[in-house]
Amino acid sequence: MENPIKSLTKKEWILWIASLFMVVLSNVLSEKTDILTLAAACIGITALIFAAKGNVWAQILMIVFCILYGIISFRFRYWGEMITYLGMSLPMAVWSAFTWIKNPSENGKEVAIQKLTKKHIFGLVFFGIIVTALFYFVLKMLNTPNILFSTISITTSFLAASLTMLRSSYYALGYASNDIVLVILWLLASVENPVYIPVAVNFAIFLFNDLYGFISWKKREKVCA
């Protein structure tokens, strides 16, 4: 539970501040600034920076982000996003927080990285298919807009959250894939209501932060090998 801000490098400070600046700018320049969207984006970016450091505070902030994003999704009737983040990503973030706390690295400042086994991969594929299929039928019943991308988002969200819980460096690629899908989803939403353009921009910024997280974990993985 060490303060993650103290361990940020100059490069990470620049990435964090630049990301927050772009988020604030995109929201301020939109037709109508949505405080909830802005708050969720700032919390999400901060969580990703801390996640790149392997700090458990990332999961605590992710819990808050899931709640805010669930509310934002509810307002546009993106039921898949709402159900996914509140019903799956939120509890898995709580679980990940406990997992990360119980598995610190040797220096005790970050979470220990775990390599995926064949058993892990089989479980991810097996349960990923089941979760995707179940959610697809639920989304179809709710007449969810853009159901194809909403369904793909469920799959990528499940993989990202599961890989985070498993302490795998590939968690970041899972979230990066989800970011791409969400950019598409919210661009489609912004066609109907331009107020959602900042949400798409937010996830585009998330993408760069998640890619940095992957690079960061891979470097640490090599050092620990």
Image (spheres, rainbow, N blue to C red):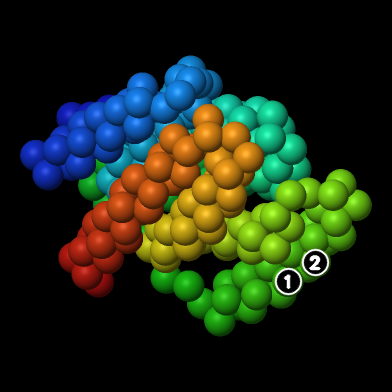
Percent x, y of residue 184 = 53, 55
Residue 209 shows in this picture: yes
Residue at image location 78% in from the left, 49% down from the top = 144
Percent x, y of residue 108 = 29, 43
- Residue identified by numbered label 2: 133
- Give me the disc on residue 70: none
Percent x, y of residue 17 = 21, 32
Residue at image location 62% in from the left, 30% down from the top = 72
Q: Quadrant of the C terminus?
A: bottom left
Asked if the residues shown at circle 2 and circle 1 are in contact, with their CB atoms under 8 angstroms apart, the answer is yes
SS state under label 2: helix
Nearer to me, 99 or 153: 153
Vertical arrangement, residue 129 with respect to residue 190, above or below: below
User: Which amino acid lies under the numbered mark 2 shown in the image of this protein?
Assistant: Ala
Q: Quadrant of the N terminus?
A: top left
Nearer to me, 72 or 175: 72
Residue at image location 35% in from the left, 26% down from the top = 29
Residue at image location 35% in from the left, 32% down from the top = 26
- Residue identified by numbered label 1: 129
Nearer to me, 42 or 196: 196
User: Which amino acid lies under the numbered mark 1 shown in the image of this protein?
Assistant: Ile
Q: Is residue 88 left or right of residue 46?
A: right
Counting labels gives 2
Vertical arrangement, residue 102 with respect to residue 174, above or below: above
